[in-house]
Image: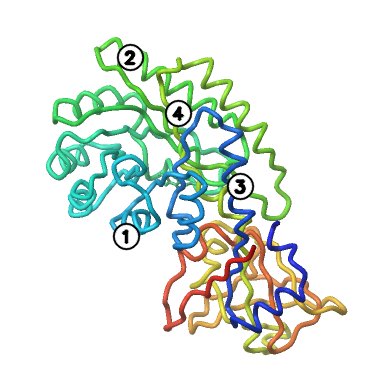
């Protein structure tokens, strides 16, 4: 079940036992999300993007369910191996700009699948992971997606041939193409366009005597926060039929979903730890905030569904985190400006429950002011 639908009484019991701030993860929802995408993309091998949420329980559950892992650092490689992954078969080091020492570490433990998008990365890979299998990431349209990843990553498609040949000459094994349509992508045409561009590169590479074997469609699959209309099955049906039309069976399909697997499998519970009235507005201070689990509110104007364990008339509140920084306000409008939200009347020690808190919350939380991230509790 979506843990946001847990009865309030059950949430209060868990808080009584474990305290706040608290993450509650539904194991069954996590597995359901993984299986759902796995079934909807029957041709694809799913590499869960560890960056979305690297908590050990989550990695263990997903490994058991059959997931492989997209890793982006030495820390994520260690976490994935600890969860049971075989570095040689189950990991893609999918950050296109890697720290040289971490490439050597990855190579040393057996990782043999790296992503790159520039010449300097080829030199680093050839030096620290000679003869490795590599995938070239291309920049594709991220229009409409929440995180515009192609601003920072991906080679121009017109540079693909040069970079593939360069990698080959450097002794690496160019194996395929990867892309990312941007996180929280709501439009399947982004995948269709990117697959068409990828096909053109496959054809050109073959003409030049280089057979490519793998298409990695990255992540980007969306999760429901508040009002999004999401149909994962339909989206995947469009991706699958485009892939089937463009590529034959010898071409492997890979995806690196993060947000869609873990997003709505976890909620957070925070407690009111302070109240004040400032400029005639009611402020509530919580024991988790922008520097903790809610950084995406600031980075991407994300809006999480919220409810309380209180009843009664609605009041307007500005919601702030516990740190000493004035930017630590989690109630913000679509332009990122601080705003009031309406919630049933709250006071000290009441609970604020936020839904769809699984992705890019724990993994992005800082330790500013010495605040530790929430404790994890797994249910079912
Ligand atoms: C290389 C790569 N793969 C996969 C993902 C996961 O994307 P998402 O969480 O949108 O599924 C990301 C996210 O930044 C990424 O950078």
Q: In this view, does 99 lie above or below 291?
A: above
The numbered mark, 1 or 2, whose residue comes first in the sequence reads 1
Residue that badge 3 annotates: 33
Label 2 environment density (alpha carbons within 10 Å; few <14, some 14–19, many ≥20): some
- Is the CB–ligand 1 distance for label 4 below 8 Å? no
Q: Which mark is residue 88?
A: none
**Alpha carbon separation for disc pair 1 and 4:** 26 Å
Q: Is residue 94 above or below residue 319?
A: above
**67 to the left or right of 159:** right
Residue 119 x, y percent position in the rendering: 21, 36
Quarter holding the N terminus?
A: bottom right
Q: Is residue 336 above or below residue 188?
A: below
**Alpha carbon separation for disc pair 2 and 3:** 37 Å
Q: Is residue 319 above or below residue 204?
A: below
Which residue does the image show at 34% across and 51% down from the upper left? 72
Under tag 4, what secondary structure?
strand
Which residue does the image show at 76% across and 73% down from the upper left? 8
Under tag 2, what secondary structure?
helix
Residue 210 x, y percent position in the rendering: 26, 17
Residue that badge 4 annotates: 253
Is the Cβ of the residue at disc 1 closer than 8 Å to that at disc 4?
A: no
Marks 2 and 4: which is nearer the front? 4
Marks 2 and 3: which is nearer the front? 3
Label 3 environment density (alpha carbons within 10 Å; few <14, some 14–19, many ≥20): some
**Alpha carbon separation for disc pair 1 and 3:** 25 Å
The numbered mark, 1 or 4, whose residue comes first in the sequence reads 1
The numbered mark, 2 or 4, whose residue comes first in the sequence reads 2
**Alpha carbon separation for disc pair 1 and 2:** 37 Å
- Where residue 89 sits, quadrant-wise, is top left
The numbered mark, 2 or 3, whose residue comes first in the sequence reads 3
**20 to the left or right of 141:** right
């Amino acid at each position: 079940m979506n843990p946001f639908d847990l009865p309030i009484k059950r949430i209060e019991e868990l808080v009584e036992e474990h305290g706040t701030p608290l993450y509650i993860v539904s194991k069954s929802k996590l597995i359901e999300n993984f299986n759902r995408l796995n079934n909807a993309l029957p041709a694809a091998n799913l590499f869960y993007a560890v960056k979305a949420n690297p908590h050990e329980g989550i990695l263990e559950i997903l490994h058991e369910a059959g997931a492989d892992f997209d890793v982006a650092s030495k820390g994520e490689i260690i976490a994935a191996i600890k969860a049971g992954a075989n570095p040689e078969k189950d990991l893609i080091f999918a950050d296109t700009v890697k720290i040289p020492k971490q490439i050597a570490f990855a190579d040393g433990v057996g990782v043999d699948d790296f992503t790159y998008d520039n010449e300097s990365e080829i030199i680093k890979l050839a030096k620290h992971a000679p003869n490795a299998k590599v995938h070239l990431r291309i920049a594709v349209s991220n229009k409409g997606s929440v995180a515009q990843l192609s601003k920072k990553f991906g080679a121009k498609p017109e540079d693909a041939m040069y970079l593939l040949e360069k990698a080959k000459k450097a002794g690496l094994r160019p194996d395929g193409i990867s892309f990312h349509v941007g996180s929280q992508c709501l439009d399947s045409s982004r995948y269709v366009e990117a697959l068409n561009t990828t096909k053109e590169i496959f054809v050109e590479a073959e003409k030049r005597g280089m057979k490519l074997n793998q298409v990695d469609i990255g992540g980007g699959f969306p999760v429901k926060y508040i009002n999004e209309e999401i149909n994962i099955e339909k989206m995947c049906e469009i991706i699958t039929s485009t892939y089937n039309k463009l590529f034959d069976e010898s071409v492997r399909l890979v995806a690196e979903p993060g947000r869609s697997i873990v997003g709505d499998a976890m909620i957070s519970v925070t407690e009111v730890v302070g109240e004040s009235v400032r400029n005639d507005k009611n402020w509530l201070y919580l024991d988790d905030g922008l520097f903790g689990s809610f950084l995406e509110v600031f980075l991407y104007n994300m809006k999480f569904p919220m409810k309380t364990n209180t009843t009664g008339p609605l009041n307007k509140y500005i919601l702030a985190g516990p740190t000493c920084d004035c930017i630590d306000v989690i109630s913000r409008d679509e332009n990122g400006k601080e705003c009031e939200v309406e919630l049933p009347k709250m006071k000290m020690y009441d609970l604020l429950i936020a839904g769809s808190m699984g992705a890019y919350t724990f993994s992005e939380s800082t330790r500013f002011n010495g605040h530790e991230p929430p404790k994890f509790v797994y249910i079912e």
